[in-house]
Image (cartoon, rainbow, N blue to C red):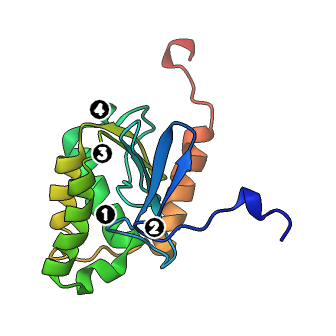
């Protein structure tokens, strides 16, 4: 079929050679779609984790090293719970096995679709995610919260008078 040379389907555990590296499909411990697959690059030792290891953080950052540890932990736990509400229904032993699969590949870097680059934080992230199934489920913001956020954004976009000029 025309065009299939540009598409290669991988299931968890499958690999493909890409020049000087091997890319392996890995099911992330957390995912919001049953077809989500992460990719581990054996040369750079990087794990491209899709939505897994995401976080809601207070401001943009270039690296997870630029985020206060408490903000990062709270943001990751909140994201994990909101994006994957099913995590509160899993057997802890099975979820632990999913975390161990990442522990076994031991990526040096984690790239998430919802967090800046994380270097050398794999074990810290896995320990944090291990607490999520038994935590209180997060509740998504409601309409009132949306209106408050929008009002705050509108207020912040208004030019403020400089007290020295008044």
Q: What crowding class fits label 3: few (fewer than 14 Cα within 10 Å), some (14-19), or many (20 or more)?
A: many
Q: Is residue 141 above or below residue 38?
A: below
Q: CA distance from mark 4 to mark 3?
A: 17 Å
Residue, disc 2 = 145
Q: Is residue 46 above or below residue 76?
A: above
Q: CA distance from mark 1 to mark 2?
A: 16 Å
Q: Nearer the viewer, mark 1 or mark 2?
A: 1
Q: Compare marks 4 and 3 and give the one earlier in the sequence.
A: 4
Q: Quadrant of the C terminus?
A: top right
Q: CA distance from mark 1 to mark 4?
A: 19 Å
Q: CA distance from mark 4 to mark 2?
A: 29 Å
Pointers 1 and 2 in contact (C-beta within 8 Å): no
Q: Nearer the viewer, mark 3 or mark 2?
A: 3
Tell me the residue at 57%/25% (across/down): 161
Pointers 3 and 1 in contact (C-beta within 8 Å): no
Q: What crowding class fits label 2: few (fewer than 14 Cα within 10 Å), some (14-19), or many (20 or more)?
A: few
**Marker disc for residue 65:** 4
Q: Compare marks 3 and 1 and give the one earlier in the sequence.
A: 1
Q: CA distance from mark 3 to mark 1?
A: 23 Å
Residue, disc 1 = 78
Residue 109 location (% of width, % of height): 34, 40
Residue 139 location (% of width, % of height): 35, 76
Q: Compare marks 3 and 2 and give the one earlier in the sequence.
A: 3
Residue, disc 3 = 107
Q: Describe the element under mark 3 as helix, strand or loop.
A: loop
Q: Describe the element under mark 2 as helix, strand or loop.
A: helix
Q: Nearer the viewer, mark 4 or mark 3?
A: 3
Pointers 3 and 2 in contact (C-beta within 8 Å): no
Q: Describe the element under mark 4 as helix, strand or loop.
A: helix
């Amino acid at each position: 079929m025309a065009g299939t040379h540009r598409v290669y389907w991988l299931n968890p555990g499958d690999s493909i050679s890409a020049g000087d590296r091997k890319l392996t499909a890995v099911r992330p411990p957390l995912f919001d779609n049953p077809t989500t697959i992460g990719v581990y690059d054996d040369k750079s030792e990087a794990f491209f984790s899709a939505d897994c290891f995401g976080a809601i953080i207070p401001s943009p950052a270039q690296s997870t090293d630029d985020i206060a540890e408490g903000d990062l932990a709270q943001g990751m736990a909140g994201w994990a719970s909101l994006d994957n509400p099913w995590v509160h229904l899993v057997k802890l032993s099975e979820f632990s096995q999913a975390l161990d699969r990442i522990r076994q590949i031991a990526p040096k870097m984690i790239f998430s679709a919802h967090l800046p680059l994380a270097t050398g934080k794999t074990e810290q992230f896995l320990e944090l995610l291990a607490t999520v199934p038994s935590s209180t489920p997060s509740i998504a913001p409601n309409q009132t919260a949306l209106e408050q956020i929008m009002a705050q954004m509108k207020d912040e976009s208004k030019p403020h008078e400089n007290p020295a000029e008044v």
